[in-house]
Image (cartoon, helix red, strand yellow):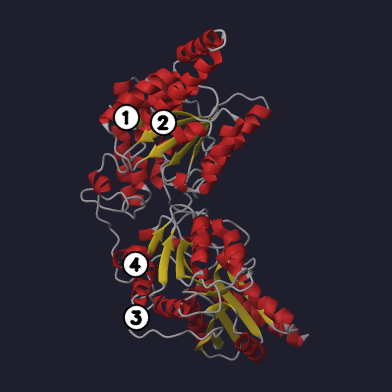
Amino acid sequence: MSILENINGPEDLRDLNVEQLINLSGELREKLINTVAKTGGHLAPSLGVVELTLGVHYCFNSPQDKIIWDVGHQAYVHKILTGRKDEFETLRQYKGLSGFPKIKESEHDAFSTGHSSTSISAGLGMALARDRLRKEFEVVSIIGDGALTGGMAFEALNYAGHLGVDLKVIVNDNEMSISNNVGAMSSYLTRIRTDPMYYKGKEELETLLKRLPAIGSRVVKVADRIKDSFKYLVVPGMIFEELGFTYLGPIDGHNISSVIYVLKRAKSTKGPVLIHVITKKGKGYQPAEENPDKFHGISPFNVENGKSLKKRSKYTYTEVFGNTITRLANNIDNLVAITAAMPSGTGLNIFREKFPKRFYDVGIAEQNAVTTAAGMATQGLKPVVAIYSTFLQRAYDQIIHDVCMQNLPVIFAIDRAGIVGADGETHQGLFDITFLRSIPNMTLLAPKDENELQHMLYTACHYEEGPIAVRYPRGEGIGVPLDSQLEMVPKGKAEIMKEGNQVTLLACGPIVYTALEAADELQKEGIEAAVINARYLKPLDEELILSFAKNTKCLVTVEEHLLAGGFGSSVLELLSQKGIDDVIVRSVGINDVFVEHGKPDQLREEHGITMENIIKKTKEALNSKKILSNG
């Protein structure tokens, strides 16, 4: 009989014995594998924390106790155990469960996440609020060893240790292997150091020694020095001890008995506690264990062999970036590449294989990546910083203060720009036009297809006037041929894709092709629409835009981005600055909302990023023009 069938909430776990919990872990892994094989998602991280998640919910009382998952890649088991078991098949599907913890989805999701290194700060804030308001609950922040490379995590650890606040931090370390000797020793030391009788005995001994005339205090100091020296030799977590935390571990995160034992000890220990748990990413599914990077985030796959079900016939934008930047590095000796823990995701794994000494992975630390690139640029290197649009937001101050203010020639390759899809609101790349075009000295481009991406990267690598950014989407390109000869894209010059004398469709990025389809449909109705590929979002091709505004009198801007401060806004600003008030403008883009998860085409349909909406807006503009003319 299935144990999982009878688990409807975390409280049901406490009726199980260790053997039943072990069997339940197997059922959970089976459910994870079979579901993610259909929906896609972050499989390997969740497989690695099955026992840890069971232990956390066994020992702590959610939702009263606050459990915060850093990033949230590993929160699938948490979702299953907290009343969402029957909905789990809808994971990452349109209007279904989010792939990340989400406050509005469940009371058990104490904090919405999606970006890394936030859990300790959030947990610290909750603990401080609890103490201030005299409430009673535990706070548990669960963070991976990768997310622990983010500076924000250490800032929070430092402050929590300084305050001595009652906070539990679990470090899920899935890169180290456990040595039996280290595990046994640390387990022994953990038992001693968390036993209340140890602290009581230690205090009584110190009191007794201090009473010895003349030498008592010196004996205590010598004993402390000896004790500290011993701890530095045998206790692996001294950096956390120095930050003010009680360190427990490392423990085997797949031994449910050990996990529960140590978590109970942590719960009874006051002040900040850090529990170091060793896990194996992809645990229990051989393809994921052997290829944890591939199964970190994966599209639907065949359970039998782990092979993706998605058939590709075109290059992805990421592949074109990786191949092009590697090709350019053959002839540009000072070209270097930087990523923030995403070599494969950004395509820089291709560059790394060819130029390992010119490749830098700074970990999950986007701020550090950008300012490191700025430092390189001051000394004559040409750094390419490849970061997803959603993660580049984290380095906004560094882009302004360290790169643009000094007008340094740093190249930003912005992957996943626009609608991303199933990862949802924390990952959609819908803000970069707004936050980049507002910065002085920044140049910003968007290719209409994978071939134009090649030329824009070539242009960026030969650009000497300051910082330059190229934004491009996730997934496959349009399928156009790739030119063998690369050329410069003239600065600030747009491209006329189709002539027309009634209305102008101004578009940027691959949605240029959707605008062309709309123009063809309009032509069937006798409406002549010009189509412009903006290419440069900053600086705009002012001369061309003003010319078409004058000659067609109706403009429709089209972008896969928020309308607020986006490409359409820049066109309206241009018309306003030039005193042109007799042209009708309509804009196609995303309104003032966060876009949730779903398939990209579903989301485009919901938010009007479609051929049909372009046609609708075009007719609105033409009708408004007629009304004005008749008036």
In the structure shown, which secondary structural element does the residue marked by tag 4 occupy? helix
In the structure shown, which secondary structural element does the residue marked by tag 1 occupy? helix
First along the sequence among labels 2 and 4: 2
Q: Are marks 4 and 3 in contact (CB under 8 Å)?
A: no
First along the sequence among labels 2 and 3: 2
Distance of mark 1 from mark 3, alpha carbons?
51 Å
Nearer to us in this view, 178 or 208? 208
- Which residue appears at 49% of the width and 78% of the height? 512
Circle nearer the viewer, 1 or 2: 2
Task: Please state the horizontal and vertical placement of residue 613, each as a whole percent of the image.
Answer: 55, 72
Which circle marks residue 24 in the picture? 1
Which circle marks residue 157 in the picture? none
Q: Look at mark 4 in the image and give the residue it sits on.
A: 351
Q: Visible in this render: residue 97? A: no
Distance of mark 4 from mark 3, alpha carbons?
19 Å
Quarter location, residue 618: bottom right
Circle nearer the viewer, 1 or 3: 3
Q: Tell me the quadrant of the picture where the N terminus can be found.
A: top left
Q: Look at mark 3 in the image and give the residue it sits on.
A: 482
Circle nearer the viewer, 2 or 3: 2
First along the sequence among labels 1 and 3: 1
Amino acid type, mark 2? Tyr
User: Is residue 148 found left or right of 3 in the rendered image?
Assistant: right
